[in-house]
Amino acid sequence: MKKDFRIAGFCAIVAGSLLFAGCFGVTQENQEQGNNEKEIVSEKVVEPITTVEKDVNGGKLQYPVVNTGNKTVSDAINADINAFIEKEEAGEGGDISKHTMEYSTKLDDDNVVAFLFIQSIGYKGAAHPNTKVDTLVYDKTTGKRKVLSDYVDITLDEILQIAQEEYYSIRGGKYNHTPQFKPTRMPKNFYPDKEGNIWIVFQKYELGPGMEDSSMVRIPASKVKK
């Protein structure tokens, strides 16, 4: 009888050990799978902005592909960027001999991503290429494009007044504003920076002579909506 009890006890210990080992193995496997899943998710946002180039007549258009970590938002932003690129690829007519576009990321934080695009378009027979500047600013929580009025309530006259002190080249460097250059319509292109300022962008000849190329007016953060 005692021998039977010893055998039964030994079997119970062995069974318990096997059960523990099995549970531990499953738990460890689940943990490893969980760690792998986390690594995959983090890999998706290692490069939140990827640069792509598209061949066009006369050159290449460079533009970003955005990954916010939210597929719905990313798809909305990238669809809008693609629509912009298709429009620019089509151009505005004329016999184009050279066409290039470069972009820069002006802001990329938790809430907003902002891009500045500079195109150089050369037409056959023209002495110099034209420069065209555009901006795209997106809400990273919704994927929608933001507009200037989201940031500032300002008139064209107020912008021109600020330009007397805050007038810059699109590629950097400060200008002295020439008063006789007065645009007749409110600009739509702008971008925010990490300091909270808003940069309003003007095309070539709109706010200065052709030698100055495209230009910008910096609206101080103190005038931006909180």
Image: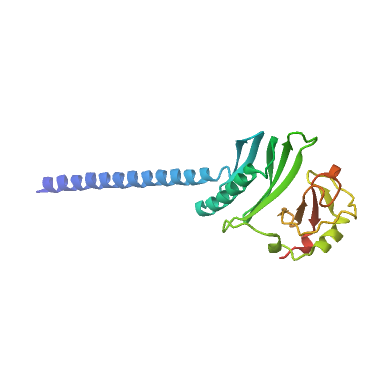
Work out whether residue 69 can be spotted: no
Decide which of 164, 204 is in the foreground and name it: 204
Residue 62, how many percent across, how many down?
A: 64, 39
Residue 4, how many percent across, how many down?
A: 11, 47
Residue 176, how many percent across, how many down?
A: 90, 50
Residue 128, how many percent across, how many down?
A: 79, 36
Decide which of 30, 163 is in the foreground and name it: 163
Residue at image coords 72%, 56%? 188
- Which residue, as the protein is rendered here, is positioned at the far left? 1
> Total label count?
0
Q: Toward which corner of the image does residue 130 lie, by quadrant?
A: top right
Decide which of 92, 76 is in the foreground and name it: 92
Please state if 186 lies on the left or on the right of 110 as rendered: right
Which quarter of the image is occupied by the C terminus? bottom right
Asked if residue 185 is positioned above or below residue 102 in the image, the reply reads below
Q: Toward which corner of the image does residue 124 lie, by quadrant?
A: top right
Residue at image coords 72%, 39%? 121
Work out whether residue 75 can be spotted: yes
Colour mode?
Answer: rainbow
Residue at image coords 59%, 57%? 144
Residue at image coords 48%, 43%? 39
